[in-house]
Image (cartoon, rainbow, N blue to C red):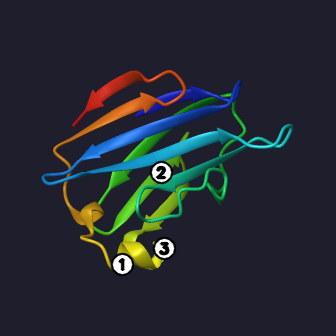
Amino acid sequence: MVTTKNDEAKCIAFDFHFPHNNGRLYILYGGAKPNHRWSYVVEECTNFEFHKYFLTSVPNNMDKLWKISKTESNLRIICNGVPVLDFNFEADSNDSYRKSDKKWSQTPHSVDIYNQLSEHVFVKAI
């Protein structure tokens, strides 16, 4: 779990360390002011374009508590108890992922969480 505030643009990166490779999930806050929105990028599943894929129903609270979970088939994001993303790796990915080694179906041995704007490590999680 990670906490954030809606007070500035940010980019949080979750590095999933799989047995043979790594995968990265980005959660971003920003875009054209005054309409900052929360968006995401799933490395090798979505195009690497910030502020193109948006999270839904993100609560308006200034403080956010994010919970990220991953199964063999899905990546789920919950913010302040509200589901904001249920990403299915097969159904929601672009064509290049469907032709790849499907690293996201693996179980990670660890996850590092970074503030990409400062390269500060928030936490090293299991």
Quarter of the image with the C terminus in it: top left
Front label number (1 vs 3): 1
- Residues at marks 1 and 3, CA–CA distance in whole angstroms: 10 Å
Q: Look at the picture and state if 95 lies above or below 103.
A: below
Please tell me whether mark 3 sits on a helix, a strand or a loop.
helix
The local crowd at label 2, few if under 14, some if 14 to 19, many if 20 or more residues have their Cα within 10 Å, is: some
Q: Look at the picture and state if 21 lies above or below 102.
A: above
Residue picked out by circle 3: 92
**Dots 2, 1 in contact, CB < 8 A:** no
Please tell me whether mark 1 sits on a helix, a strand or a loop.
helix
The residue at 69%/33% (across/down) is 61
The residue at 42%/30% (across/down) is 114
**Dots 2, 3 in contact, CB < 8 A:** no
Quarter of the image with the N terminus in it: top left
Q: Look at the picture and state if 101 lies above or below 48.
A: below
The residue at 38%/72% (across/down) is 97
Residue picked out by circle 1: 98
Residue 13 percent coordinates (x, y): 44, 38
The residue at 19%/55% (across/down) is 107
Front label number (2 vs 3): 3
- Residue 72 appears left or right of 68: left
